[in-house]
């Protein structure tokens, strides 16, 4: 006699599940990410731009071997992830990047990282409350960071004095910039919204359009053709514009470190592009601003750029001194894109003139109608109008 077997119940373990994508260098990891992945990185003080790229990749969690917020300065990346509802676990240790296999299915629960039923790493679960508390503490310790910033700015000015004071190393593009407005588009938070806000300005003023890295693709997506593209030639930076954007631009400027080999621009030349070299330690965003300033632009509109103190400090890893000194250099010309809709109302159109004239004629007619002569004219016009109506009715009958 066959005894009835007891059915096994599948136990669903708690936690969040996703496929691991592992790389110590976040820049090379970003292109590999897909929706539902778990990004495993090693980056102290996650910055806002990288966090936004992770959000755009639709990851469900970020594991960081290092602290998300070290306390050196109030970096904005963790706040971006927290607001997007992405789970964060930091301080899992550098060894975890070797243990966690790329492509493995992970289960995350209470700071633990599991493969199947085995815990392979553990760290600190970072929620929105933790982020706000640590950002507040980091802001209180800014004095030391500002001292370091002052030293770094002095060193940068010493190294780049020919660039900042004389502009002698800035290339001259074929695009005419002198006495023309320039719009510089940088891939940043809300750059698409800001670009839409200056659409009327671009249509009516025909400015020089400069795309910085993938900012060139943002211009194309908005229906604009970039005149100049500024890209980074530093090795390992793969977040550049598309080949389509590079081919439609009149000028492509590659920003490289001083003394970089001639081969630093080879990958653009293989696309049929003849780039201009811009040798500087500045960021690509700052290189674009300096390029517009040296070309004597009438005004520079910055789209997607960093404007607040927290945003400036968030750029510590990518050139705070460069950003600060560049802003001092181009300050009289630079306007943030968010201010353009308020400051610029557009050109006067023919219909505007028509309605002003029409309103004036109505006002004159009303004034004349109150005089004896005006009333006499009105009686004559009414009589003539009546005769005309009678005549037209006679033609119909």
Image (cartoon, rainbow, N blue to C red):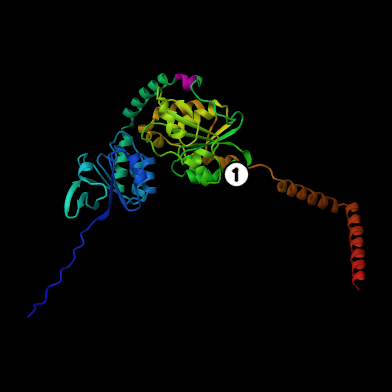
> What stretch of residues is rendered in magenta?
161-165
Quick one: SS at disc 1?
helix
Residue closest to the eye, 141 or 324? 324
In the image, 176: left or right of 359?
A: left
Residue that extends furthest to the bottom in the rendered view of this protein: 1
Give me the residue at 85% from left, 51% from top: 368
Residue closest to the eye, 32 or 183? 32
Residue closest to the eye, 96 or 243? 243
Which image quarter is the N terminus in?
bottom left
Which image quarter is the C terminus in?
bottom right
Q: Quadrant of residue 137?
A: top left
The residue beneath circle 1 is: 200
Picture coordinates of residue 192 (x, y %)? 49, 45
Picture coordinates of residue 240 (x, y %)? 43, 38
Q: Quadrant of residue 15?
A: bottom left
Residue that extends furthest to the left in the rendered view of this protein: 1
Give me the residue at 18% from left, 48% from top: 120
Picture coordinates of residue 375 (x, y %)? 89, 55
Picture coordinates of residue 335 (x, y %)? 53, 35
């Amino acid at each position: 006699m066959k005894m009835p077997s007891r059915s096994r119940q599948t136990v669903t373990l708690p936690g969040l599940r996703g496929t691991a994508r592992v790389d110590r260098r976040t820049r090379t990891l970003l292109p590999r990410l897909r929706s539902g992945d778990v990004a495993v990185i090693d980056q102290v003080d996650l910055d806002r731009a990288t966090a936004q790229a992770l959000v755009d990749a639709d990851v469900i969690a970020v594991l960081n071997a290092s602290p998300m917020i070290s306390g050196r300065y109030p970096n904005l990346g963790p706040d971006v992830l927290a607001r997007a509802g992405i789970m964060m676990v930091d301080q899992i240790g550098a060894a975890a990047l070797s243990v966690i296999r790329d492509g493995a299915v992970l289960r995350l629960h209470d700071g633990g990282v599991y493969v199947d039923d085995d815990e392979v790493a553990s760290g600190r679960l970072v929620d929105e409350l933790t982020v706000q508390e640590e950002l507040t503490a980091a802001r209180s310790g800014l004095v030391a960071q500002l001292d370091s910033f002052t030293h770094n700015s002095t060193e940068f000015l010493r190294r780049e004095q020919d660039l900042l004071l004389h502009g002698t190393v800035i290339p001259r593009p074929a695009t005419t910039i002198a006495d023309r407005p320039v719009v510089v588009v940088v891939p940043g938070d809300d750059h698409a919204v800001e670009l839409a806000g200056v659409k009327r300005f671009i249509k009516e003023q025909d400015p020089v359009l400069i795309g910085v890295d993938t900012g060139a693709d943002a211009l194309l997506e908005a229906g604009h053709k970039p005149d100049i593209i500024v890209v980074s030639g530093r090795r390992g930076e793969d977040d550049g514009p598309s080949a389509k954007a590079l081919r439609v631009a009149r000028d492509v400027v590659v920003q490289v470190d001083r003394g970089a080999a001639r081969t630093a621009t080879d990958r653009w030349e293989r696309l049929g592009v003849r780039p201009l070299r811009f040798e500087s330690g500045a960021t690509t965003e700052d290189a674009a601003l300096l390029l517009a300033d040296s070309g004597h632009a009438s005004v520079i509109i910055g789209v997607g750029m960093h404007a607040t103190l927290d945003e400036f400090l968030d750029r510590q890893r990518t050139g705070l001194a460069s950003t600060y000194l560049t802003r001092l250099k181009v300050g009289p010309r630079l306007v943030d894109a968010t201010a353009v809709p308020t400051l610029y109302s557009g050109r006067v159109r023919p219909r505007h003139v028509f309605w002003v004239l029409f309103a004036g004629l109505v006002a004159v007619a009303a004034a004349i109608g109150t005089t004896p002569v005006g009333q006499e004219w009105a009686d004559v016009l009414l009589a003539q109008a009546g005769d005309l109506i009678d005549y037209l009715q006679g033609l119909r009958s």
